[in-house]
């Protein structure tokens, strides 16, 4: 069983690294040239109106919205004179020196930013550049955080169709963006591998981190079981193994000994045949 993170700093580093690795799955595939602009814009016959490019763009939209919101909030907090308090691992921005309340961090995934970069769903090269750029921005906003940004409260806006707000944290939304990406990678994988038959798509593309951890755990568990079984079998076979050795030593005697054994076996066979013939004649 995996052990829990020992601090907000450790949790932040782990989730940030995991999300960056998920983003890097797309980077590696786009960089390998396995996907051309033609396959990137192929419209699925199974998932209506869906293309790999649209799924990749949608993944980027969510992470860019989160990073945009954090960057804007950090700029507003800095301008208002708010500072990070280090008295608690879950510290947030304190009030400014002028007594004004620190700006609230809000994230709204329903806001549409696709029009700013429409080419990232039609160009594999443009998508690659944006994935790299967004991942770099993600690391920058967490520089020097030491777990404080991870635990920073935020207000999540949702259109239901009424606009409502709910509580969340930066860490929670960072993890959501990672899992959201995996979901859309899996759909893109269906189009690329199952419909287009493309080769060179990594087996781990579109697989959740928890599934990968579980698979690795099972491999390690199976290796341990195999080693244990082999050790137990070796102990059980120790005595028979010795007797086999003695038999091997007896059968590996001199050529004259093997010849005499063979000669006596032939005599035994002829004697048995003679007895069988005698019995038949009596009948």
Image: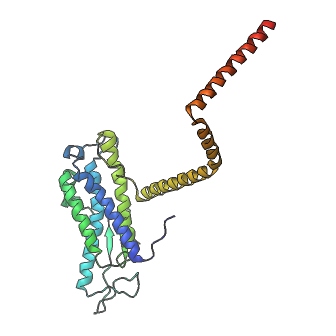
Q: Position of residue 158 (x, y in %)?
A: 36, 65
Q: Most extreme residue toward the front, as rendered?
A: 256
Q: Residue at x 65, y 21 (%)?
A: 266
Q: Residue at x 25, y 74 (%)?
A: 71
Q: Quadrant of the C terminus?
A: top right
Q: Residue at x 18, y 55 (%)?
A: 126
**Is residue 278 left or right of 14 when viewed as pictured?**
right
Q: From the viewer's perspective, is residue 238 above or below residue 272?
A: below
**Is residue 264 left or right of 254 when viewed as pictured?**
right
User: Quarter of the image holding residue 24?
Assistant: bottom left
Q: Residue at x 32, y 76 (%)?
A: 105
Q: Position of residue 165 (x, y in %)?
A: 38, 71
**What count of labels does the image hold?**
0
Q: From the viewer's perspective, is residue 119 above or below residue 248?
A: below
Q: From the viewer's perspective, is residue 21 above or below residue 148?
A: above
Q: From the viewer's perspective, is residue 198 above or below residue 10?
A: above
Front residue of 243 and 250: 250
Q: Position of residue 10 (x, y in %)?
A: 40, 74
Residue 271 appears in the rendering:
yes
**Is residue 229 left or right of 165 when viewed as pictured?**
right
Residue 161 appears in the rendering:
no
């Amino acid at each position: 069983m995996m052990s829990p993170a020992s601090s907000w700093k450790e949790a932040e580093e782990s989730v940030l690294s995991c999300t960056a690795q998920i983003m890097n799955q797309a980077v590696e595939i786009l960089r390998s040239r396995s996907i051309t602009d033609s396959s990137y814009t192929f419209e699925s016959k199974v998932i209506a109106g869906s293309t790999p490019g649209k799924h990749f763009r949608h993944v980027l939209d969510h992470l860019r919205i989160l990073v945009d919101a954090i960057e804007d909030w950090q700029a507003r907090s800095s301008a208002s004179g708010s500072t990070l308090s280090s008295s608690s691992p879950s510290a947030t921005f304190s009030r400014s020196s002028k007594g004004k309340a620190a700006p609230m961090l809000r994230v709204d995934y329903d806001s549409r930013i696709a029009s700013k970069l429409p080419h990232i769903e039609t160009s594999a090269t443009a998508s690659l550049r944006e994935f790299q750029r967004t991942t770099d921005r993600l690391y920058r906003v967490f520089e020097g955080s030491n777990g404080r940004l991870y635990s920073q409260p935020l207000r999540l806006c949702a259109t239901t169709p009424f606009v409502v707000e709910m509580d969340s944290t930066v860490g929670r939304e960072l993890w959501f963006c990672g899992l959201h990406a995996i979901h859309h990678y899996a759909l893109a994988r269906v189009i690329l591998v199952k419909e287009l038959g493309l080769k060179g798509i990594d087996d781990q593309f579109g697989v959740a981190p928890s599934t990968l951890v579980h698979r690795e755990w099972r491999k390690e568990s199976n290796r341990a079981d195999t080693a244990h079984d082999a050790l137990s079998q070796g102990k059980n076979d120790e005595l028979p193994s010795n007797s086999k050795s003695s038999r091997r030593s007896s059968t590996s005697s001199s050529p004259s000994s093997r010849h005499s054994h063979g000669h006596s076996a032939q005599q035994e066979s002829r004697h048995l045949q003679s007895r069988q013939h005698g019995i038949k004649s009596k009948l």
